[in-house]
Amino acid sequence: MQDQLLTPPAAASEAAVSAPSQKSVEKIAHENNKLHKRLCRQVGQAIGDFNMIEDGDKVMVCLSGGKDSYALLDILMTLRERAPINFEIVAVNLDQKQPNFPDHILPAYLEKLGVAYHIENQDTYSIVKRLIPEGKTTCSLCSRLRRGILYRVATELGATKVALGHHRDDIMETFFLNMFFGGKLKSMPAKLQSDDGKQIVIRPLAYVKEVDLSRYAEVKQFPIIPCDLCGSQENLQRKQIKGMLRDWEKKFPGRVENIFSSLSTVAPSHLMDRNLFGFTGLKASGIADPNGDIAFDDDPCSTPVTVASIIPLRAAD
């Protein structure tokens, strides 16, 4: 009773307002759990759809210190405990000797996790600065140098798969960048053979939205290392594409989802790549082809036509 009298009514009410209720705490925990389950499901689906990880694999997770690669490592470690197959994980970070890079953060984090890791020290920063004029974007050259080093490290570590943290938004943005600025229908595949032909590169986050990864990083409190230590300007073209997709998502819900779905539903006979489809040798066979002109009958932009609406038109003729 005495303790209650020592707390003024005003102070008690302020404390009640500032402190989250038990119900709100439980709701937040529920939403966080749903997010984790969704990410695990999407990553698991991508792995299954593209046969990314097989029994006995040693997966090298490329860890940059950004939210995406942290999430990739975290989810793969979860799935490793649940998977019906056995595979190893080794986290690898390339220290490119950028000024002010906090080289203590990743080793401390990985040791706390208890995961095998390797830090590769290579001064690519000086190379990039020497070759790229001041004020120009360095990301392209930096990426090529980093990729070559990581492939070499993967071979040295005996890794059978190299896992990168690119997500669904990265894939979509790259698709439009290639279309708008490169004149190609090309993006980031979920699985590919490395440049040197010695590695299989996988992108287990291929089905995951960036907004979910951002939220997951907040929930898990990953020790994020910024990607602007080199002082390079952000790729303005990618920034433009990112803004376009964000606007589409707001104004036309479902459009971006349909575009992403189209990347895995391709009809080569209805494009114009002569190397992809044998247009020059195409002859009439006399046999009905479901992939011929009938494919145009299913026009996604057309107004549905019923039999009743067609009959009066024919009678008028």
Image: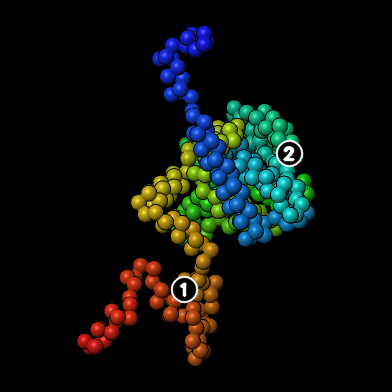
Residue at image point 49% right, 54% down: 172
Q: Tell me: residue 12, above or below residue 217.
A: above
For label 2, count other residues whose C-alpha is less than 10 Å away and answer few (under 14), some (14-19) or many (20+): some
Q: Tell me: residue 43, above or below residue 291.
A: above
Q: Amino acid at mark 1?
A: His
Q: Tell me: residue 279, above or below residue 255.
A: below
Question: Which type of secondary structure does the marked residue at label 2 adopt?
Answer: loop
Give whichever of discs 2 and 1 has the lower sequence position: 2
Question: Is residue 197 in view from this perspective?
Answer: yes
Q: Name the residue tied to disc 1.
A: 270
Which sits in the foreground, 56 or 91?
56
Q: Tell me: residue 19, above or below residue 115.
A: above
- Image quadrant for the C terminus? bottom left
Mark 2 or 1: in front is 2
Q: Seen in the image, is 302 located left or right of residue 70?
A: left
Residue at image point 60% right, 42% down: 71
Distance between the alpha carbons at the discs numbered 2 and 1: 48 Å
In the rendering, at what x and y percent does residue 113 appear?
71, 35
In the rendering, at what x and y percent does residue 216 appear?
55, 40
Q: Quadrant of residue 9?
A: top left
In the rendering, at what x and y percent does residue 115 appear?
73, 39
Q: Amino acid at mark 2?
A: Val
Q: Quadrant of residue 313?
A: bottom left
In the rendering, at what x and y percent does residue 269 appear?
49, 75
Q: Name the residue tied to disc 2.
A: 115
Residue at image point 64% right, 36% down: 96
